[in-house]
């Protein structure tokens, strides 16, 4: 094995690694010899199959495994011998033709790129002071929550002959949709139920049925959104012939013991307690989210160090890919719509740099303080993922069992939350009471409110 360093920068190392064909062949022969006694082939006594025959039968497939192992082993050796601390998974680029290597006709040659952890010392956490916004759950908040629950349990009753449909009413309708006068697939339904104002149909559809009465026949003209999921309908103009069969008004459930029973609780008092507990939990999650944002902002401001270029570029590409999709679908934030592409790239590259800086910082703080994700925590995360797909739990378990990258995606947010919890235990935190409305504000808006107060 020959390892040659081809680049030596402060945060980047590159190597050209060669594993000779004779070394690979020796590994193959060793493996074939070790499996010889375990192989039974027709025409040979157990354990007596010639190695040459085994090589002819299994050699190519086995060499493929050996090449993969050799790449991993050589790459790890290059890192370990130089005591390097990779900031991300090394980048591997094959130089030799893999097919020829597997066939035993060529040395294994590849390049290895390693982005390194920058050298920095985390700031003294005791110097960081943060404000955590907290909000009490008022009795009126509980009552409002109960009203929402009652609304969700509403039933519908006929409004009577001649009654006009208003927002919140449920219509039973038949409709036939046409594009250029021709009915299209999925555009026809009978006895379909539609709540006016729910936004569940194509934009503009429900508005044209306000004031409709049972027995009315209306023509509803709409255009499918440009980003409509069915590509063959996206952006198309359509006309629907709609027959209104029934108009019904919604009747909210009474806020009493019977509502509690419907929701699986013994009494209205128990329902009130559950609603208050849920609101308190929501407040706690929102408070923590604001505190985490303030913490990350403080860490970002108090640290400045060089970033591995490849990490920043990879993060930027991921962000920019989403921006391009948002531009294409018209979902770009209003404040960004007037900016040029160059301006957007500069802005989102800064965001990529911030994410990389904070990611490296949290990783280093976690390492220095021996913060780890336990197997039990990973198992709980996998179970939580599986529960999101009823009936497919076993398939989800198999995906995580056989896919280290998928497990790594679960581990990352757990690790981050544990490091954030540790940091919050080290910094100075002042709880400041705010209203429920203030607590629900955008982090930047709330920060401004806290400064003003």
Image (cartoon, helix red, strand yellow):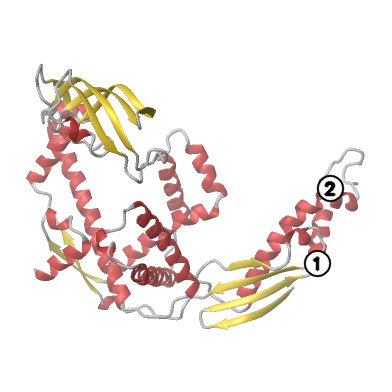
Q: Quadrant of residue 258?
A: top left
Element at label 1: helix
Q: Taking the image as drawn, is residue 213 in sight?
A: yes
Residue 297 in the image: above or below residue 388: below
Determine the CA span between mark 1 and mark 2. Answer: 19 Å
Residue 407 in percent (x, y) is at: 49, 53
Q: Quadrant of residue 445?
A: bottom left
Residue farthest along the front direction in this orientation: 180
Q: Taking the image as drawn, is residue 374 in sight?
A: no
Q: Quadrant of residue 124?
A: bottom left
Residue 326 in percent (x, y) is at: 35, 55
**Residue drawn at (80%, 66%) of the image:** 106
Residue 208 in percent (x, y) is at: 19, 33
Element at label 2: helix
The residue at which mark 2 appears reads as 57
**Residue drawn at (63%, 77%) of the image:** 81
The residue at which mark 1 appears reads as 21
Q: Quadrant where the C terminus lies?
A: bottom left
């Amino acid at each position: 094995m020959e390892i040659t360093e081809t680049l030596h920068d402060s945060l980047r190392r590159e190597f050209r690694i060669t594993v000779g064909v004779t070394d690979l062949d020796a590994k193959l022969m060793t493996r074939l010899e070790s499996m010889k006694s375990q192989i039974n082939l027709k025409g040979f006594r157990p354990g007596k199959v010639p190695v040459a025959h085994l090589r002819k039968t299994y050699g190519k497939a086995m060499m493929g495994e050996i090449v993969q192992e050799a790449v991993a082993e050589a790459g790890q050796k290059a890192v370990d011998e130089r005591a390097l601390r990779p900031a991300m998974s090394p980048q591997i680029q094959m130089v030799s033709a893999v097919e020829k290597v597997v066939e035993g006709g060529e040395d294994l040659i590849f390049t290895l790129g390693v982005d390194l952890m920058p050298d920095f010392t985390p700031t003294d956490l005791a110097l960081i002071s943060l404000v955590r916004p907290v909000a009490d759950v008022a009795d009126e908040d509980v009552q409002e929550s109960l009203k929402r629950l009652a609304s969700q349990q509403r039933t519908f009753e006929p409004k009577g002959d001649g009654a006009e449909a208003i927002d919140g009413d449920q219509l039973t309708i038949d409709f036939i949709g046409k594009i250029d006068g021709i009915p299209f697939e999925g555009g026809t339904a009978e006895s379909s139920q539609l709540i006016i104002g729910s936004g569940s149909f194509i934009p503009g559809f429900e508005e044209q049925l306000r004031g409709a009465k049972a027995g009315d026949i209306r023509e509803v003209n709409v255009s499918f959104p440009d980003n409509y999921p069915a590509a063959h309908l996206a952006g198309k103009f359509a006309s629907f012939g709609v027959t209104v069969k029934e108009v019904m008004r919604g009747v909210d459930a009474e806020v009493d013991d019977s509502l509690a029973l419907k929701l699986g609780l013994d009494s209205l008092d128990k329902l009130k307690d559950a609603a208050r507990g849920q609101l308190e939990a929501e407040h706690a999650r929102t408070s923590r989210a604001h505190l985490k944002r303030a913490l990350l902002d403080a860490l970002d401001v108090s640290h400045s160090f060089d970033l591995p270029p490849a990490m920043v570029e990879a993060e930027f590409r991921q962000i920019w890919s989403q921006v391009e999709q948002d531009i294409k679908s018209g979902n770009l934030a209003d404040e960004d719509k007037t900016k040029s592409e160059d301006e957007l790239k500069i802005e989102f590259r800064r965001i990529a740099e911030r994410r990389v800086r904070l990611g490296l910082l949290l990783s280093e703080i976690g390492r220095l303080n021996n913060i780890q994700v336990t197997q039990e925590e990973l198992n709980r995360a996998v179970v939580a993922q599986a529960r999101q797909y009823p009936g497919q739990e076993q398939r989800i378990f198999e995906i995580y069992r056989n896919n280290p990258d998928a497990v790594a995606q679960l581990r990352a947010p757990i690790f981050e939350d544990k490091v954030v919890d540790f940091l919050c235990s080290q910094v100075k935190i002042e709880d400041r009471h705010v209203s429920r409305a203030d607590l629900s504000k955008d982090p930047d808006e709330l920060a401004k409110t806290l400064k003003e107060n």
